[in-house]
Structures are given as C-alpha cells and as structure tokens.
Amino acid sequence: MTELLRLDDLSVTYATEGGAVPAVREIDLVVDRGEIVGLAGESGCGKSTLASTILRLQPASATVTGQVLFEGNDVQTMRWGDLRALRWAGASIVFQGALHSLNPVQRIGAQIAEPIRVHSSEVSERQIETRVGDLLEQVGLPAARAKAYPHQLSGGMRQRVMIAMALACEPRLVIADEPTTALDVMVQAQVLGVLSDLVHDLGVGMLLISHDLSVLADLCDRIVVMYGGRVVEQGPSKHVFAAALHPYAAALSASFPRVGDPAARYAPSGLAGDPPDPARLPPGCAFAPRCSRVKDECTTAVPELRSFPDYREAACIRVGRP
C-alpha cells in the first residue's frame, strides 16, 4: 500500500491560564491509501485535537512537537501556499454536526462548489455544476438537491452533503470526525456505508474518528484506541474489538451489547468513572484509577506501547501477565 499519512511522536499542548494542558502525547500513526483506520476513545481523549492538527487547524494557543507527514511532506513546516493546496485537494475533513458546519443561508450546491472554484481556477461554471451533481449522486442524493438549503434536508442528508464537500477536490485522504453523531441507527448505517464504498471505489485513505468501537470494528481495517491523549492499543479491527489487550479497549468493547448475546443482554458491562482531566493527569498509567486490574506499579511509570503477535500493540504492563 501507498503511505499517505504518518504521525511521528506527535504531541499537542495547549497554553491556558491554569498552565500547560497536554491534549495529545507522543502519537505514532500511519494511514495508507485504500485503508480505513479507526480512532476510538471517550470524549476528551484527544481525538479531535489530533484530527485538527493533521491539517494544521489548531489554535494559536497550541504548541505542536513531532511530525505530521502527508505523502512525505511535513505539514507543520509547510509554507502557506503549499498548506492551502493540501487542504481540500490533498486531504479534507468531515466535521461532526453538519448543521453547524453548513452555511444556513446558502444553497448546498454553492457550498460544494466553493472549494472546486478555489482549487480549480480553469474549470467552467458548467463543469462545476456537473461536478456538484455528480458528487451528490455519489453520496446517494439526487443532483436536484443542489438547490436546497441545509434546513430543508434531514440530518443524514446534511451529513452526506458534508461528505460530498470533502470529496469535491478529489483528495487522497479524508478525515471523518464523528460523522454519525446524533443520527439514528438506520441513517448512521447508510452514512457509514457511503464512506466505506467511497474508500473502496476511489482508493482514498480514511481516518475515521468515533467513540463507538462497534462502528469502527464493522468499517475499519485497523483500530487505534486513545486514552488520556496517548495511544493505548492498536491493531487489526477484528482483534481489537473481539479480544482487546488493553483493559480500556476491552471496557469500550464491552460497553456495547452484542445483538443475540444473552450474557450482554442480561448483564451489560460499563466503565465506571470519567476520563482524566488533561490538565491533571494521574502519575503512571492514566487509566489506573479506573482499571480493575491495577497494581501498585501501574501508578508509578507510564507504560510504553509494546508489540504483540498479529500486528498488535498495547501500552499496559499487565498484558501477557497474570
């Protein structure tokens, strides 16, 4: 496979009145062309910060160390002109909450056409109109919907419009940040099906961010699980979902009842407590205060990400031990 995105030792720290807040810590991650990589974790674990940093959308208060390499080029050191060309045309992002991302007083056709005009100056208006219609049909909407305003579409339709916009300039990488938030399960399945088909039909790479491990397991080739700003487990999706190594990944998987599984139906599992405040991370393993397998040594040293069979990695000193 062709490597599209590589994160090397990426860390993001926000400067606040209360001091430095480490939102992302020492992340290594790779996304190849034609591959869907899932990024999982609870709210506050650093997923959205990671997504915005890939396209250098972080606020001025953020300090970034490490590298974000897109097709071998470091995004953090790019000149403005190169960065402008990268956004939309090289890599694009689908934000969560389409209703808040779309302009309510502009027809959706005009919004999809905008990035095409910016990045393809020699394209005629007729060609742009045809391209907009093709994009809408590609995500399962009639071309005639280009004349609609966002409020005239359902939640699932608006999310499809966001996907069409992300594909407008034929990017090689699509970042989807919680693309099915607030959608009912039927519409969620439809939107995820659209994303999967696009990756396989167009050969783009995708980083799909979600708190729902079951959704990622159905769609992704690999899953990366984050907690407290760090990667705690990664590997093939079928292994991470069905037989997680890290206690946190296992708890995420168990939090979603499996249809037809009596044990899950009558004794649903959950995860007590809340994720740590990035400004006040506990010493040692950040998951230790919520872990059912915690030992004294877990509270003194931050566990390193170690390799295991079947192309898996986990950051837990208890893995492989009683």
Image: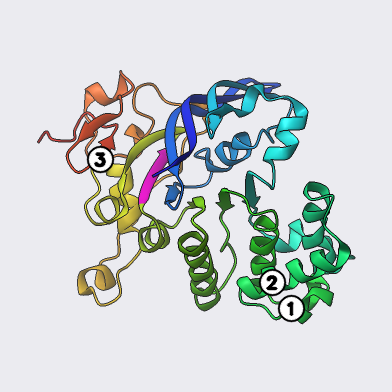
Distance (Cα) linking label 3 and label 1: 44 Å
Q: Mark 1 or 2 closer to N-term?
A: 2
In the figure, 284 relative to 321: above or below? above
Find residue 312 and name its label: 3
Residue 239 spot, x, y in % from top left: 24, 52
Q: Residue tagged by mark 1?
A: 143
Q: Residue tagged by mark 2?
A: 134
Question: Residue 320, located in which quarter of the rendered image?
Answer: top left
Disc 2 marks which amino acid? Answer: Asp
In the figure, 18 relative to 231: above or below? above
Determine the residue positioned at 24% across, 57% down: 242
Q: Specify the quadrant that holds the N terminus.
A: top left
What are the residue bounds of the magenta stretch? 222-226
In the figure, 111 relative to 148: above or below? above
Determine the residue positioned at 74% across, 78% down: 143
Residue 295 spot, x, y in % from top left: 21, 29
Disc 1 marks which amino acid? Answer: Ala
Give the foreground label among 1 and 2: 2
Q: Secondary structure at mark 3?
A: strand
Question: Residue 78, located in which quarter of the rendered image?
Answer: top right
- Majority secondary structure in the magenta region: strand
Distance (Cα) linking label 1 and label 2: 7 Å
